Amino acid sequence: MNFGERINYELDNHVAVLTVNGVGPLNIIDIPFYNGYNDALVEFREDDSRVLLIKSGNPDHFTAGFEVDTIIEGMKSGAAGNTITDNDMVTPKPIISAIKGFCIGEGVGLMLASDFVFADSNLKIACPETKLGFNAVTMQVKFTQRIGHNRTMEFMMGDMHDVHWLDRVGLCTKICDGDAEEQALAYAHKIANNNAPIAVRGTKGAIWHTVNSHKDEAIDFALWAKDMTLDSKDIQEGVAAFLEKRAPEFKNE
């Protein structure tokens, strides 16, 4: 079934497969993506599936992130922004992501919503928000919880990293040689068929609550920081520079 024009959702023997059909050759995420994504997660929560696989409908890339020319409006209106990384406990069922090519910005948010990450060896991953003039909100909180302060600061400066970096920091379940989606799907079926669903849900819930026991204060600060950047002139300059293919001239205002 389809949830809008960007999300396809199918159920196969207790494994749900959510396919992201973004815009253009880089599988860009736009505002219509969010409604479809959230509706699909509601379906996953309520149906009889046991595992969710998130993958790309693009042959080359997971996603290069959000449409830069509409992201400010989308974040201010609430139509875009925090939903992806906040949804990792919409359900205690396990989520697997299969990522390849570019995994940038909101693509990283999808990855962080996952319990298992299967990554192709050609992966290029980055979170360039600070280079555009704003904060990555909950992504920076979740990265800190998982990989620590220093590595999160490094990543949030926006430079591109490869799959070996992702593996070194402990976020990659398996590096794959061009077949991440196939291996991730096989692993999803293995969990669905070989592990007791109640025990799996209980395990994920216990781990999630352990990691997130002090998250609320961090999220509140991250949201405050997001609002501060959205009201700044620097975010306008960062987005304009990106679209005009030039270096930004940030004024700290």
Image: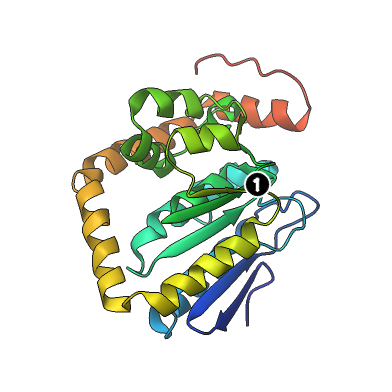
Residue at x-position 42% and y-position 71%: 191
Q: Which amino acid does label 1 sit on?
A: Thr
**Up-down relation of residue 112 to residue 32 (above or below):** above
Residue 35 pos. (x, y %): 54, 67
Q: In this view, does 225 lie to the left or right of 20?
A: left
Q: Is mark 1 on a helix, strand or loop?
A: helix
Residue 142 pos. (x, y %): 37, 42
Residue 72 pos. (x, y %): 58, 42
Are there few (<14), some (14-19), or many (20+) residues within 10 Å of tag 1? few
In this view of the protein, can residue 253 be seen by the observer? yes
173 and 216: which one is in front?
Answer: 173
User: Picture quarter containing residue 182?
Assistant: bottom right
In the rendered image, the quadrant that contains the N terminus is bottom right
Q: Is residue 87 left or right of residue 92?
A: right
Q: Is residue 212 left or right of residue 154?
A: left
Q: Is residue 238 left or right of residue 194?
A: right
Q: What residue is pinned by disc 1?
A: 70
